[in-house]
Image: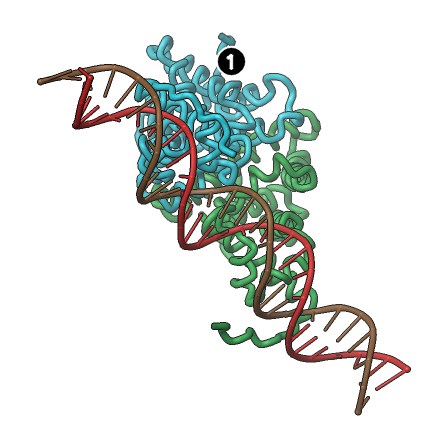
Chain colours: A green, B cyan, C red, D brown
DNA sequence: CCTCTTGTTATACATCTGTATAATTCTGGA
DNA sequence: TCCAGAATTATACAGATGTATAACAAGAGG
C-alpha cells in the first residue's frame, strides 16, 4: 500500500527557505491564493509540508516572507536602472519609467501575484506596513528626481507631481500587463514618457533597452 | 440532535439571485476569495447552500454573475455623472474624473474586491471578456470626449491620450483607496485634474460635488 | 381532495486544508 | 564507534469545501 519513501535529501537553510518562498509565489501567480496550499507549495519545492512548519512555523508566516521578497524584488528591478545615471535627473526619470513598464516588471503574472496579495495586505498589519513602505519608497525616489528638475524645487508641488507620475506608471503597468494584446510594441512606455513629459513640463527621452 | 429546521421561506427569483450575488461580493470584499465559500454565501443571504446550485448550477457560475454585476455597477457609477453635461466635453471629462476618484467608487473594499477578481479573470474566458469590454468601454468614452476637444480630432492621438488619462485615473484610484491616510481631502481628484489638464493641454475645473 | 411541480432545506460524501505528532535519516562531536 | 540532536519524511486528525442527493413544504390545476 505504501508508496516509495521520498529519498532523504538535505539542503542549506537558505536554499530551503528560498525554494519554499519561490514555490509559494509561483503558485499565487498562477492560480491565486486558493492554489497556494501547503501541500502544493511543498510539492513544487520538492519537499513535504512538514518543512513549512519547520522553517516558517505557520503558513501565514511563509506568506508574509514571500510578500516581503516580492515587494523587494519588484522595487529593486525598477530602481536598479537609475543608478548609472543618478547624476542626470531627466535620464534617471526616463530610465525608471521605462524599467517599470517593460518586462520583467510589466508582466501579467506579476500583476496577478500583486493582486492576490492586495487583500491580505489589508488584514495583516505587518504586510500593510511593507506595502506602504514600498509604495512610498518608490514615490519618494520619483519626488527626489523631480525636485532636481529646474523650477520644481518646492517639495509640496514636487510631491503632487510625484503622485501623478506614479499614478501614470501604476495605471499603465496594470493595463499593459493585463491586456497585452491591446498595445503595440513599446507603446506603453512611449505613452508614459509623453504623459509624464507633459505633467512635468520637461521632455523625456526613452531609455535605451538593455 | 437535530436543530430547528429553518422555516421555509419563498422569494422571487430576482430577490434570491440578487441576495446570493450581493453576499458573494460582500464576502470577497471583506475576506478575499477564500472567504467566499458556498456556505458563507448562503448563510449571509439567509438561505442554504443548495440554493446556489439551484439558481446558478455551480459556484463558478455564481462568481461569473457576481463579477458581471460588479463591473457593470462600477462603470455605471463612474459614467452616469457625465450625462447631464454630455454636450460640453470639458465639463464631462471633469465630471467623469471626479466621479471615479471619490466615494463610492474610491473605496478600499472596492479595490480589494476588484483585485480578488483579477486572478480569476485570467483563467475564466467569459470573465476575461467582461473585463476587457468594461475597460475598453470606459476608455472609449474618454476618447470620444477627447476627440471633441479643439485640436484633438485625430483618433490615433486621441487614443493615446485616452490611454494616458485612463492610467492616471486607475493609478490614483488604486493609491487613493489603498492608502487613504496619505492623501488630504479631495487631493486625489485635484491631482488627477491637474495631471490630465497637462496631458490634454486643456484646463479642467473640478466638478461640484453632488 | 389529490397529485405534480417547483422552491427550499437538510444530509451525505469524497476530497482537501492546516497543523500536530510520530517515525526515519543523516550529521557532528565525544 | 556511537549516540544526541537536528533535518526530513510520513501519518494522523479535526474541520472545511463543493456538490450530489434526499427529504420536505407549498401552491396550482384538475
Q: Chain of mark 1?
A: B
Camera-nearest residue between B118 and B34: B34
Q: Residue A18, image x and y in percent?
A: 63, 61
Q: What residue is drawn where x is 60% and y is 20%?
A: B187
Q: What residue is drawn where x is 65% and y is 74%?
A: A10
Q: Residue A56, image x and y in percent?
A: 68, 55
Camera-nearest residue between B33 and B163: B33
Residue C30 vs B55, above or below: the answer is below
Residue B93 vs B57, above or below: the answer is above
Quadrant position of residue B184? top right
- Mark 1, secondary structure of its residue: loop
**Residue B148, visible in the rendered structure:** no
Q: Residue A90, image x and y in percent?
A: 60, 42
Image side of residue B209 versus residue A17, left or right: left
Q: What residue is drawn where x is 39% and y is 32%?
A: B67
**Residue B198, visible in the rendered structure:** yes
Neighbour tally class for label 1: few under 14, some 14-19, many 20 plus, Cα within 10 Å = some
| Residue topped by disc 1 | B206
Q: What residue is drawn where x is 49% and y is 8%?
A: B210
Q: How many marks?
A: 1
Quadrant position of residue C24? bottom right
Image side of residue B57 versus residue B199, left or right: left
Camera-nearest residue between B126 and C4: C4
Q: Residue A33, image x and y in percent?
A: 51, 46
Amino acid at each position: 500500500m505504501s508508496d516509495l519513501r521520498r529519498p532523504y535529501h538535505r539542503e542549506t537553510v537558505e536554499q530551503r527557505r528560498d525554494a519554499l518562498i519561490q514555490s509559494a509565489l509561483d503558485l499565487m501567480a498562477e492560480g491565486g491564493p486558493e492554489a497556494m496550499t501547503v501541500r502544493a507549495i511543498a510539492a513544487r519545492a520538492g519537499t513535504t509540508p512538514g518543512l513549512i512548519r519547520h522553517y516558517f512555523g505557520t503558513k501565514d508566516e511563509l506568506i508574509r516572507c514571500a510578500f516581503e521578497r516580492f515587494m523587494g524584488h519588484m522595487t529593486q528591478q525598477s530602481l536598479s536602472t537609475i543608478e548609472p545615471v543618478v547624476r542626470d535627473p531627466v535620464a534617471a526619470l526616463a530610465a525608471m519609467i521605462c524599467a517599470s513598464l517593460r518586462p520583467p516588471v510589466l508582466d501579467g503574472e506579476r500583476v496577478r501575484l500583486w493582486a492576490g496579495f492586495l487583500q491580505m495586505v489589508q488584514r495583516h498589519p505587518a504586510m500593510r506596513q511593507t506595502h506602504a513602505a514600498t509604495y512610498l519608497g518608490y514615490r519618494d525616489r520619483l519626488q527626489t528626481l523631480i525636485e532636481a528638475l529646474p523650477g520644481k524645487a518646492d517639495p509640496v508641488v514636487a510631491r503632487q507631481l510625484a503622485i501623478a507620475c506614479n499614478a501614470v506608471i501604476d495605471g499603465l503597468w496594470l493595463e499593459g500587463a493585463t491586456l497585452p494584446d491591446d498595445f503595440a510594441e513599446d507603446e506603453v512606455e512611449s505613452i508614459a514618457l509623453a504623459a509624464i513629459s507633459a505633467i512635468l513640463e520637461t521632455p523625456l527621452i526613452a531609455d535605451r533597452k538593455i
